[in-house]
Amino acid sequence: MKLKQTLLGIILVLGCFCGVAAAAEIKIGVAEALTGNAAQYGVPIRKGFELAVGELNGTGGINGNKIELVIEDEQGKKEEAINVFKKLIFQDKVLMLFGPTLSNSAQASDPVAQAGKVVVFGTSNTADGITSIGNYVFRNSVTEADILPVTLKVAAQETGLKKVAVLFGNDDIFTKSGYDNFVKALQALKIPVATTETFAKGDVDFKPQLTKIKGSNPDAIVLSALVAEGGPAMVFRHASWRSCCRSSAATA
C-alpha cells in the first residue's frame, strides 16, 4: 500500500510538470539488480513495483492513463547500472526511473539521470552523498547517518558493551559509509574500538579477520556489510560472542 501511494504521488506530480497526455501510457523505468549477489534485494523490489502498478492499472490507472514499467537488470554493477540508465532515459524515454538497488551503483548511474534531467528515485540507497549528486536525485531510505547512531546507542544500553571490534567491506560506498558513521557514533558514545578489520566483495573466508578480532577480546562486533558477505561473516563468528551485527536488508 505504501509503495502504491508513493508511486501514485510521484507520477501525479511529474505528470503535472511534464504534461502527460490524456489516455496515454505512462512509461516508468525500473533499474534493479535482478541477477547476481544483490538480486536478493532487487527481485523483491521489482515484485513490489509490479504489484503496485497492477493495482493502480486495475483501478483505471492515473487519470485514465495506464502505467507501463520498463524493467532492466543492472546486476548490482556500476557499469551495468550506467548502461541501463542510458537505455531507459535516452532509448525508452521513460518519464522517470526507480533504482538502482545498491548505493555503489547509484553513485555511478545517478549522474546520468541528473545530466538527462530525468528524476531518479532510489529505492534502497542509504550511503552518504547520494542526493548531493543533483536536484533530480531522490530516495526514500533512512540514511546511515540517521540510523546507525541510534542502533549503537540502543545496543550499548541493552548489552552494556564497553569495547567493540569493527569489520567492514572496504570496496563499496555503502559499507564504507556504514563504517564512517559507525566510527563517528562510537566516538560520540565513547566506546573504544579494539581492532578494525576489512574484507572485499566476494570474500567467503573470514577466519583471519575474526581470529584477530577474537584476540582483541571485544564485547561486540560492529559489522558493515552487504548480505552476500555479511551472512558468512556472521556464521563464522565465534558462537559465544555477543554481537552488534548489521548487514544490509532494505538499505544498500
Image (cartoon, rainbow, N blue to C red):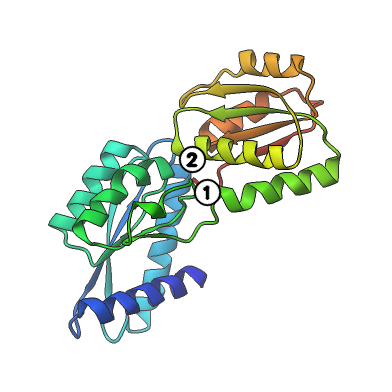
Q: Work out whether 117 lies above or below 15.
A: above
The numbered mark at residue 243 is none
Q: N-terminal of the two: label 2 or label 1? A: 2
Q: Could you tell me residue 195's position as x and y percent?
A: 68, 21
Cα–Cα gap, marks 2 and 1: 9 Å
Q: Could you tell me residue 236's position as x and y percent?
A: 67, 23
Look at the numbered disc 2 and give the secondary structure of its residue.
Answer: helix
Residue found 80% across the figure and 42% down from its top: 156
Report the residue marked by disc 1. 251
In this rendered view, identify the residue nearer to me: 153 or 85: 153
Crowding around mark 2 (Cα neighbors within 10 Å: few <14, some 14 to 19, many 20+) is many
Residue found 37% across the figure and 73% down from its top: 10
In this rendered view, identify the residue nearer to me: 100 or 189: 189
Say left or right for 245 vs 13. Answer: right
Crowding around mark 1 (Cα neighbors within 10 Å: few <14, some 14 to 19, many 20+) is many
Q: Work out whether 82 lies above or below 198.
A: below
Report the residue marked by disc 2. 174
Q: Work out whether 173 lies above or below 66.
A: above
Label 1 near label 2: C-beta < 8 Å? Answer: yes
Q: Could you tell me residue 115's position as x and y percent?
A: 21, 54
> In the image, what residue type sits under mark 2?
Phe
> In the image, what residue type sits under mark 1?
Thr
In this rendered view, identify the residue nearer to me: 28 or 68: 28
Residue found 58% across the figure and 32% down from its top: 230
